[in-house]
Image: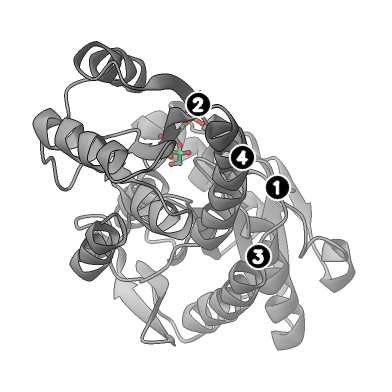
Amino acid sequence: IKKIGVFTSGGDSPGMNAAIRSVVRTCAYMKIDCMGIYRGYQGMIEGDFKPMDARSVNNIINKGGTILKSARSLEFQTKEGRKKAYDQLQSAGIDGLVVIGGDGSFTGALIFHKEYNVPIIGIPGTIDNDIFGTTYTLGFDTALNTVVEVIDKIRDTASSHNRLFFVEVMGRDVGHIALNAGVGAGAEEILIPEENLGLERLLESLKRSKASGKSSSIVVVAEGDKTGKNVFELKEYVEEHLPIYDCRVSVLGHMQRGGSPSCFDRVLASRMGVKAVEALLEGKSSLMVGIQDNKITLTPISKAIKGHTKIDKELMRVSDIMTV
Ligand code: F6P
């Protein structure tokens, strides 16, 4: 491998810049060239490349978003698009790739590798933590801290007005953000897609909590929850069946993807970037860097995109106990 191309793809997540920095600096350390590819696969198709040296990534470890920009490319899903991308890599002399992204980006990477045999290593960057083969994805920890900070603020106003707040958090079709931030923020109830306990149970729990002397409450709702109602319909349902509460809804949205990465995400990104470049130099491909038992590991991308990290049952129990 003489020249590695690095790019970010799919939804951005805090820590992506720290990972770019790590890949670029590891290349400099190993004395190989590094090329930044802008706007993910779309930029690859268009040849939107820029050489990166160690100094080109100064002062980005603390920055949210991604300096290389990100995109979800429809053109790359076509054979013609991938052919164009391959030709661009060839003419730029890029002979290895590091993709920082989520499962959609990894699926594209696998197809591309099968068709053109370009070595490719993945770094999991998504706030959702929905990738198998790593206990933590880049950005998850920062997103949790953001959500907890915001719910703390919502709690101030909820308790001042004796209100019940439904707070919708991201996570696509998994409940890791909801469960972890919910426990961290002391939520009364946490609704996640992995365990749909039904609306009856929600009403019972809210009734019990009112009877036990609580005057305000926070219910954290994962955006992919399986109650069959969106967060606004949930609010209406509770208001209708439990008129003892004055309810409000807060949808946190994309603020969860922004902000300066936590120290945890910066360290994780730095470790993952080093491993990704090392793996390419050792002739490996189609693997994803992860962290398991605090060790940096490699998992076949084909496995990483098939399964999700399981929801933590012990944490669900802790959440139940805390709302006694
Ligand atoms: O995968 C990250 C994520 O933020 C999910 O939590 C969310 O469902 C989705 O991306 C939102 O996507 P977009 O930014 O395209 O609206």
Residue type at tag 4: Asp
Foreground pick, 178 / 163: 163
CB of mark 1 within 8 Å of CB of mark 3?
no
Q: Which residue is mark 3?
A: 262
Res. 71 visible in picture: no
- Amino acid bearing label 2: Ser
Q: CA distance from mark 1 to mark 3?
A: 20 Å
Callout 3 amino acid: Ser
N-terminal-most mark, 2 or 1: 1
Mark 2 highlights which residue?
250
Q: Is residue 68 above or below residue 311?
A: above
Circle 3 or circle 4, nearest the eye:
4
Asked whether 85 or 222 is in front, the reply is 222
**Residue 131 at x, y = what percent?**
32, 58
Label tally? 4
Which label was assigned to residue 68? 1
Badge 1 amino acid:
Leu
Q: Secondary structure at mark 2?
A: strand
Ranked by sequence position, the earlier of labels 3 and 4 is 4
Q: Residue at x 45, y 27 (%)?
A: 75
Disc ID at residue 156 = 4
Seen in the image, is 76 located left or right of residue 111? right
Mark in the foreground, 4 or 2: 4
